[in-house]
Amino acid sequence: MRNPKITFIGAGSTIFVKNILGDVFHKPALKGAHIALMDIDEERLEESHFVVGKLMESAGATGSISCHLDQKEALQDADFVVVAFQIGGYEPCTVTDFEICKKHGVEQTIADTLGAGGIMRALRTIPHLWQICEDMIAVCPDATMLNYVNPMAMNTWAMYEKYPQIKQVGLCHSVQGTAEELARDLDIAYRDLRYTCAGINHMAYYLTLEKKQANGEYVDIYPELLSAFEQGLAPKPKERGNLRCVNLVRYEMFKTLGYFVTESSEHFAEYTPYFIKPNRPDLIERYKVPLDEYPKRCVEQISSWKEDLAHLKQAEKIEVKESSEYASTIMNSIWTGTPSVIYGNVRNDNLISNLPYGCCVEVACLIDANGIQPTSVGHIPNHLAALMQTNINVQTLLTEAILTENRERIYHAVMLDPHTAAVLGIEEIYALVDELIAAHGDWLPAWTQN
């Protein structure tokens, strides 16, 4: 049996490459894989080459590595295509999104999914994803794309619309990652949790959330979780990770809605109109909303990268614990036929009946030799679907804007954003969009400048 070829687009993201491929090399059937690393930054590409080589040696992997500055060359005969890049980077594009929005009175936390920041990122990103699709059709038409690029829902939707023949799934760690957080908040072993989850990326909900008892039966833990929150026992203070990000927004929404959402509080605060308001510092303080969180993370990561790289170069071995990311599980299941279940972002072909047909939804998917097979959820609670629809409205209009090259739909998308609409009037929204488009210039498609 031949070994698979795994192409990594955006391989200059060395730490992410290390984590994903570290998982890959834990799978015996994938240890002989050929890894094709592709990036436009030659220096970062070489750094990733070095790290992956040492990682392979440490894991006893027997495959090979190639490095590519040319995307189509890297994709030739690939079986799996991992996509993880950020067009425009922290500088200039993320800085532009935050500074101009703040100038117009719109505060943001992450700005990679929705709102003016998420919309600009989608406009920068989708044309490049389409080019990957074009190249895949030419040189690896049967490959499966594992897409980690935000804004996940808009990116995935736009690819399904223009290139429906591409096998793809959008991947995020929020479903399994939040379940692990909730288990910690309640002092429950994660392996004893059982849940079903559905919705849209960054706004999916645990429709059921249960724990296994000593007698083997499962019991709903939502009452226990609500009680822990009301008594001040949850969320627990973080012991590691980003200590700025306290999880109060999601618990407040859980108390209100009766279901827990999958994405972090710092993300969720800007998907709704309730938490970030002009002249309401009391809300920011009460819910500990970390404004400008993403730029702070970027600065910290950039400043620590050289130290991290030096450590990796000095280490005799690079050993990576298997993570909860889905990429290696998907590859292993497709390659070996061993079935697994993951949560993926896919086209809504009546999978969730009270969300729009064709939008991008996040549901459980069966993975085996037949590929990615999404499961049908049916009807979800109407109040959850209604809240998701406020985000889908934005996704719908942005997807239409870029498919039809209609600049007016960009304004409409920002007008429908819940957070922006709660802060700005119509003329102010138009002025914000105009300034963002002008500032981004050639980072955006040419038609946006007309």
Image: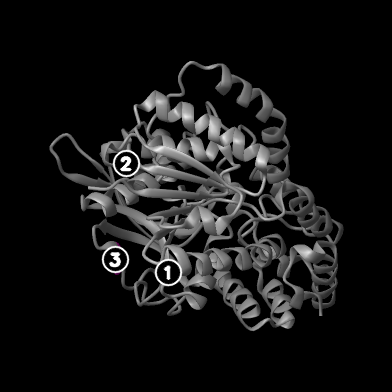
Quadrant housing residue 361:
bottom left
x and y percentages locating residue 359 in the rendered image: 47, 74
Query: Could you give the CA–CA distance between mark 3 and mark 2, rounded to whole angstroms?
Result: 26 Å
Mark 3 is surrounded, within 10 Å at the Cα level, by few (under 14), some (14 to 19) or many (20 or more) other residues, namely: some
Residue labelled with disc 3: 375
Of circles 1 and 3, which is in front? 1
Q: Amino acid at mark 1?
A: Ile
Q: Callout 1 environment at 10 Å: few (<14), some (14 to 19), or many (20+)? A: some
Q: Position of residue 371 (x, y in %)?
A: 29, 61
Q: Residues within 10 Å of mark 2 (few under 14, many from 20)?
A: many
Q: Secondary structure at mark 3?
A: loop
Q: Residue 297 at x, y = what percent?
A: 67, 39
| Residue type for callout 2 | Leu
Residue at point 40%, 54% (across, down): 80
Relative to 395, residue 242 above or below = above
- Proximity of marks 1 and 3: CB atoms separated by less than 8 Å: no
The residue identified by callout 1 is: 166
User: Does residue 135 sit above or below 310 in this rendering?
Assistant: below
Q: Amino acid at mark 3?
A: Thr
| Location of the C terminus (image quadrant) | bottom right
The mark that comes first in sequence, 3 or 2, is 2
Assign a secondary structure to mark 2.
helix
Q: Residue at x 74, y 82 (%)?
A: 408
Q: Which residue is mark 2?
A: 30
Q: Viewer-proximal residue, 241 or 131?
A: 131
Q: Which residues are magenta?
A: 372-376
Indicate the secondary structure of the residue bearing disc 1: loop
Counting residues from the start of the chain, the first of labels 2 and 1 encountered is: 2
